[in-house]
Amino acid sequence: MAALDGREVDSYKLVETKGCQAVVSGPVRNGSLTCLCVAMKRQVICYEVNKTKARHRRLRELQAPGPVQWMGLLSERLCVGYQAGFTRYSVHGDVAPVSLLHPDDHTLAFISQQALDALCAVEISTKELLLCFASIGVYVDSQGRRSRQQELMWPAVPLSACYNAPYLSVYSENAVDVFDVNTMEWIQSIPLKKVRPLNSDGSLNLLGLETVRLIYFRNKTAEGDELVVPETSDNSRKQMVRSLNNKRRFSFRVPEEERLQQRREMLRDPEMRNKLISNPTNFNHVAHMGPGDGIQILKDLPMESRAGFSGSVSIPSITKNRAEPGRSMSAIPTLQ
């Protein structure tokens, strides 16, 4: 995370992962280990991410039946999607791989005959999965046999899909279609053109039009938000912009009038105002000055020192016009 922030840290390159087209990570062995799986064409390498000097340890390497099109960790098993199929593997190699399309189930033979591309796999329960392909979604049991006669059909050509229980979000060129995987209902269509998911559950998305924007899909059934958005006013017009120095880094840009409004709101709050004004650093205490001391010092200045000013000095009464908290500091002596 420190490296992503642009700080100087030691990096450890995984040389053998050059040319990877898919990557997934997650906890295994009841959360005691973190696994990282990287796919290069048909080859998949599984690593254990740890706190050793090298930060990783190679667990195993496997060959998928075809070029990997999707990967996910389902119940601590690696699920690999490729053209016309899905296979589930153990990341430690202690269990034989299982094809999620059983060869004896002839009702699923059309998938291999039409060579459908893999989109994603959803684990509905320990006994049922939803396998999503380019034109259809089929329900199978843990052995790969059909569990429901009904199938899911996409209203448009899908580009990707994400799962946030119980909703499946299917992304196409002009919209995002949301399905309930339990009831098989088509819940809604979100009319967003060229939107792409940034995470596995599809809650954070990238809208790549004239201006790049972040779109957050909120699950109404969830207890709270999964994304913490930078605090701004309710009518915020935040815009995500690409860094000039690093094209792969983005940041939020807020209009100047809104930035000033934020500052005014912060100054009204005494607690926030204390945080806004930092403590003094690197200074020497020369003398303590009270409310009226500055006026006396100016009166005691020699006339030649006063002549250096190209104008008159207006010194309002500090004690009478002292600024209240959160107000404009107009009572500070100014040059006119």
Image (cartoon, helix red, strand yellow):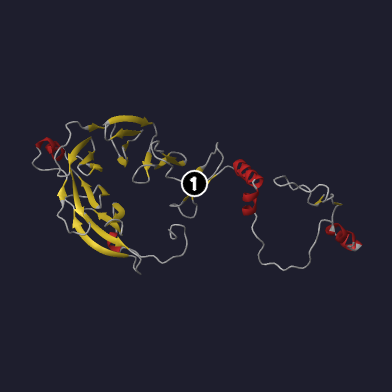
Query: Image point 44% across, 45% down: which residue?
Result: 227
Identity of the residue drawn at 64% across and 53% down: 274
Q: Residue furthest right?
A: 303
Q: Nearer the viewer, residue 132 or 285?
A: 285
The residue wearing badge 1 is 241
From the viewer's perspective, is residue 262 above or below residue 10? above
Q: Residues within 10 Å of mark 1 (few under 14, many from 20)?
A: some
Residue at 12 percent across and 38 percent down: it is 109
Relative to 280, is 228 above or below? above
Residue sitting nearer the eye, 273 or 212:
273
Q: Quadrant of residue 173?
A: top left
How far from the left and from the top, in percent, is residue 260?
63, 44
Q: Amino acid at mark 1?
A: Val
Position of 78 with respect to 316 (left or right) is left
Tag 1's secondary structure?
strand
Q: Is residue 25 above or below residue 106?
A: below
Instruction: Provide residue 93's location: percent of width, then percent of height.
Output: 18, 59
Relative depth, front residue between 288 and 7:
288
Q: Is residue 238 visible?
A: yes
* Percent x, y of residue 134: 24, 38
Residue 117 at x, y = what percent?
A: 22, 41
Give whichever of 332, 218 is nearer the camera.
218
Total number of numbered discs in the rendering:
1
Q: Which quadrant would the N terminus be assigned to in this image?
A: bottom left
Residue 193 location, quadrant: top left
**Is residue 19 visible to us here?**
no
